[in-house]
Image (cartoon, coloured by chain):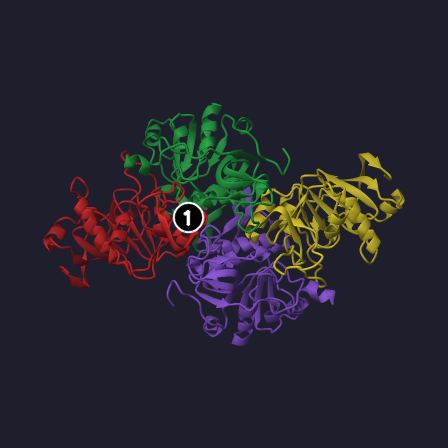
Chain colours: A red, B yellow, C green, D purple
Amino acid sequence: MGDERQIIAKRAALEVKDGMIVNLGIGIPSMVPNFLGKDMRVFFQAENGILGMGPTPKENADGNLSNAAGLPVTVLPGASYFDSAIAFGMIRRGCIDLSILGALQVNARGDLANWIVPGKRVPGVGGAMELAYGAKNLIAVMNHCDKDGKPKIVTECSLPVTTYHCVKKIITEMAVFSIIDQQLYLDELMPGYSLADVKNNTEADFSFSTNFKAHD
Amino acid sequence: MGDERQIIAKRAALEVKDGMIVNLGIGIPSMVPNFLGKDMRVFFQAENGILGMGPTPKENADGNLSNAAGLPVTVLPGASYFDSAIAFGMIRRGCIDLSILGALQVNARGDLANWIVPGKRVPGVGGAMELAYGAKNLIAVMNHCDKDGKPKIVTECSLPVTTYHCVKKIITEMAVFSIIDQQLYLDELMPGYSLADVKNNTEADFSFSTNFKAHD
Amino acid sequence: MHLFNKVTDYTTAQSAFFDGMTLLFGGFGGVGTPPGLIDCLIDSGVKDVKLIGNDAGFPWIGIGKFVCLERATHLLASHIGSNPTAGDLMNQGKLQVEFSPQGILVERIRSGGVGLNGFLTELSKGTQLEYDKPKVTIGAKEYIYEAPITGDVGIVYAKKADTFGNLIFDKTARNTNPYVAMASKVTIVEADEIVPMGELDPEEIVVPGIYVKYIVQSKGYNWKWVWETKDK
Amino acid sequence: MHLFNKVTDYTTAQSAFFDGMTLLFGGFGGVGTPPGLIDCLIDSGVKDVKLIGNDAGFPWIGIGKFVCLERATHLLASHIGSNPTAGDLMNQGKLQVEFSPQGILVERIRSGGVGLNGFLTELSKGTQLEYDKPKVTIGAKEYIYEAPITGDVGIVYAKKADTFGNLIFDKTARNTNPYVAMASKVTIVEADEIVPMGELDPEEIVVPGIYVKYIVQSKGYNWKWVWETKDK
């Protein structure tokens, strides 16, 4: 499972391009920076109020310098601090080139469910709605199935939806999908998984991307 | 006329108390600080984005340090700069203890007209609406009559209203009025003017304040 | 208390708290929540508090310490994921929790703080977080109306305050604090450092002192962060 | 243009202007209006411009220089009292002027800049400045709906910019500039000083560079202020 999460994060890192403004959710998305090339100049934003976050400090972590998950970070040259209203202003205004979020379910139309499992987990929505609404590109990263082995790429979300028609790409340990005009397309199979694996574990119908490829 | 304006400003200065946050309009209001006691600690706010203005600089005026009229000012210890949205946020939120504004007409219910003379003067409303809406106390200062000798304290404003039911006190060269619960009361006669003068030059009906006094 | 000297002790600040008050608290995951004022709130014994802030903190961090005492009846926040006790109280019906998208919540506090009457957004349209908020149609489009928020009391954590209450913050501890200061009838600031007027550069002041009622001296965070406890 | 180096020349910046554009301009009575970009706008020859900003400047100061050329068709501002030419053009039907309360105008620009869909206020209720703005009833109260404003291009004057576009301002020249930067599709900044990334303290940055498209070097104000001409 730990390995799978690393593999998903590594694949997601390929979506990050030089010169991008990127916001990462907690969980798998937070591992993405570990897989970025050293020459890649990317500015990470966090919705508590910081732009230009650097790596986790090795020592002397500062309780007042953290990402949206409350974990200590550092700053790169050119970083800025601002209040949370401005942080979300940036997000809604479309200043974030790429948002990578964890997901509980995604349906074929790109509806995202990631904030509540009624009766079980009530974390609350946090900044997910704004990110799903405002980011120019939204990638959902998640294990292909939930802990009970049930598909998370579904025909209709059974969990309450965070935002409709927002997910543009889904990356799991099994496959990469694109969602274009509310249609689901299979882009890639991930190493070690067959088309049969993906078909058996995906509830939603999907087509093949014109540039579909089985493996790298 | 110059003298009258000075006299009005001097009387208005008596309304300014130690520890107040004050916003002054252009014209007569801008002369009020000249008549404040030296031991009076007052913070002047201007809606372009400054709190804690000091006197006009004697030399080395800075084009980027000005009041809302664009005239150069200085800052006192404890002053702050901020953007215009926050400046008006303070005003609407009720953080201004006292606003002193010029007026074209005021009626007996405290409606203020001070932004346009249709077909003649079209200055625009500037920040007058917000100040009239938000200030805890609003004093209108003006000559008792207009240039044609017509009363400016009227039964109904013939000029477009800036804000309804906002003026709490009127100070002219002839008299001081209070407006309480949309009723006009004569508080004082100014030196050199009789009750007859005031009656002859005031269109609106008024009563006498319980503490009415003819002269100081 | 004169306009230009608002520095006081925790006992005086505590007198601002009352049963049933709406309390706005600054902070994001406990970062920027005033630790001394949280203890002061706990010591005050007040109850039936309506809490409004970004999140429920952690059980031992920030507002979470107070939430766990069951003296709040309502919590309006963007998430409570970091404080399982808050979730338990919610499920037991002891704490009424309303969720808001994070950025919408801080904008609602700002809307109250700048004297406006709320705003329109399409953000939560069609989701559970619409609740029964009014819908407003402008042109051909329907929006959700988000009401302004103000508080009876607001608690704020600043890096520096001068005696007038001009504030600067520390890095990401700024977060919601400026708007809590603006939107509260009685704003109490806990500052790491209190300086005379004139010592802060007018350009660097983030919140003008006009919004502040009381200033108390902080002794700093008195809790361990999650990542500190993990290290051990 | 790379994210981290947006410094360019006036010719490149000028290419952002086009006939019929909505132009947001920073400044308050000309203070904080970028002088070099005003000249650049004049030189561009663009026409049919819709102007949105605090005021019409003075005939020889700020946006007023452009207004006098009769190449703007619309002006949305809080006042035009300091520019009699603007009033003349309005009375001759050559310039369509809409007035807004000053603080409402800058809030409308902010609303566009932070991606919200407008706000409610009771401020101009019952006055001429209601125009035909939608009325919205919430509970028992009726409010005026104020729509968000965005611009095709925004011109901003800053004291310092780093090459990413992080901005700090100079005293009261800040005024509406931060929101013009946020609300414009193409934000052009004229800065008195351009510095490498890392030179500005992250804490003192007022506008993060994320909003900025182009940065040009200023040569400072090239007009006389009213109080300077009075002195003579």
Give the residue type at disc 1: Gly
Q: Circle 1 sits in a helix, a strand or a loop, which is it?
A: loop
Residue C129 falls in image quadrant: top left
Q: Which residue is mark 1?
A: A49
Q: Chain of mark 1?
A: A
**Dot 1 alpha-carbon crowd within 10 angstroms: few under 14, some 14 to 19, many 20 or more:** many
Q: Nearer the viewer, residue D196 or C214?
A: D196
Whether residue B172 can be seen here:
no
Q: Nearer the viewer, residue A43 or C191?
A: C191
Q: Residue at x 87, y 39 (%)?
A: B214
* Above or below: residue D191 compared with residue A46: below
* Above or below: residue C230 compared with residue D25: above
Whether residue D17 can be seen here:
yes
Quick one: quadrant of the C terminus of chain D?
A: bottom right
Q: Horizontal and vertical percent for residue A197?
A: 11, 51
Q: Is residue D14 left or right of residue B48?
A: left
Q: Horizontal and vertical percent for residue A7?
A: 19, 51
Residue A37 falls in image quadrant: bottom left
Residue furthest out toward the top: C45
Residue C57 falls in image quadrant: top left
Q: Horizontal and vertical percent for residue A164?
A: 32, 50
Q: Horizontal and vertical percent for residue B131?
A: 64, 48
